[in-house]
Image: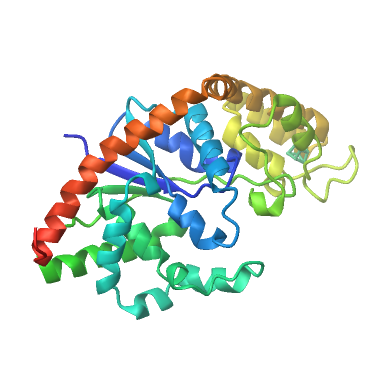
Amino acid sequence: MAKRVFSGMRPTGKLHLGHLAGALTNWVRLQNEYECLYCIVDWHALMSDYADSSRIRKNCKEVLLDWLAAGLDPEKSTIFVQSHVPQHAELHLALSMITPLGWLQRNPTYKEQILNIQNKDLGTYAFLGYPVLMASDILLYKAEMVPVGEDQSAHLEISRELARRFNNFYGEILPEPQMLLTPTPKVPGTDGRKMSKSYGNSIDIADSPEEMWNKIRTMITDPARERRTDPGDPEKCPVWDLHKVFNDDKEQHKEIIKGCTTAGIGCVQCKKMLMEHVKRVMEPIHERRRYYESHSENLRNIILAGAERAQILAQQTIDEIVNSIGFVP
Ligand code: SF4
């Protein structure tokens, strides 16, 4: 039997090329090798957006559209929305009983987010406990593997510790999920910082080729290359980082390195080359997105079918947990 993989994404709105290259391309590949469950974690969105939840439903739809556009196949993967499977909340409650507060208070991401996110009051009980909900998402399906980038390994460690702690108290029920470390390519936004919606520098999956070109055309380049006649250094240029992600023509890579470092090519020409590759990669993705946008009744069916499949697995785990704790069956 294929090993089970779980991953989730918060519904924050339209996804961008960073999500595509950093996670979705990998998820699409994994669905051919493993039994994959991909979950839109709307309860997690509520943790930070509880004061204004008006966009969560729309954002879930955008994420689903982007997932399907990227190539997630509901015939191969179980695609669902977290709140449609109430067992996530049930396991979250059970695990919260055994989670030492110190584990959560020491979580570096928690401290960082509390400091950095100033426009929302995140001093809530649920936000402190978000690694517990995350652990519930994974452990509910007894997922053996979780694809993570290196920066997320601390979260998974709490899930593993919680599985061990639960098993210590109640018997071997929850397997410890393993990290499926995935290479995360550097995907800078138009201003050179990490591509992120909150920086306003993202190129969205749903952007038309024209919109993408407008963003790529105005991207910053090697700051030292002020004039066309100045030589540049691709390693200091975010456009080059995107070439490395989207341009698979190794000969052209050599041309660009030579052209840039000798001022043989201009940045506009280099960006046009990049755009050709982005267009080629995005063409089938845009086509699938258009298809699902015009068949929105399918979207509902996909997530309902996904929730139904997920619930069967989830209830099996909950039954075992209830039994092992010793509640009245
Ligand atoms: Fe960047 Fe290309 Fe311009 Fe070099 S030629 S600075 S790699 S955009």
How many numbered discs, if any?
A: 0
Please tell me which residue is depicted at 12% across the width and 55% down the height of the picture.
320
Of the four image quadrants, the one with ligand 1 is top right
Quadrant containing the N terminus in the rendered view: top left
Please tell me which residue is depicted at 82% across the width and 31% down the height of the picture.
268
Please tell me which residue is depicted at 87% across the width and 42% down the height of the picture.
230
124 up-or-down from 58: above or below: below
Question: For residue 220, which quarter of the picture?
Answer: top right
Specify the farthest residue to the bottom: 102
166 up-or-down from 41: above or below: below
Visible in this render: residue 82? no
Q: How is the image coloured?
A: rainbow
Quadrant containing the C terminus in the rendered view: bottom left
Seen from the viewer's position, the closer of residues 281 and 313 is 313
Visible in this render: residue 314? yes
Q: Can you give x and y, in whole percent of width and height, for residue 55 in the image? A: 59, 48
Seen from the viewer's position, the closer of residues 326 and 185 is 326
Seen from the viewer's position, the closer of residues 143 and 132 is 132
Q: Is residue 3 left or right of residue 274?
A: left
Q: Can you give x and y, in whole percent of width and height, for residue 22 in the image? A: 51, 43
Q: Can you give x and y, in whole percent of width and height, for residue 31 in the image? A: 34, 32
30 up-or-down from 127: above or below: above
Q: Can you give x and y, in whole percent of width and height, for residue 99 in the image? A: 29, 73
149 up-or-down from 290: above or below: below
Please tell me which residue is depicted at 56% across the width and 72% down the height of the picture.
114
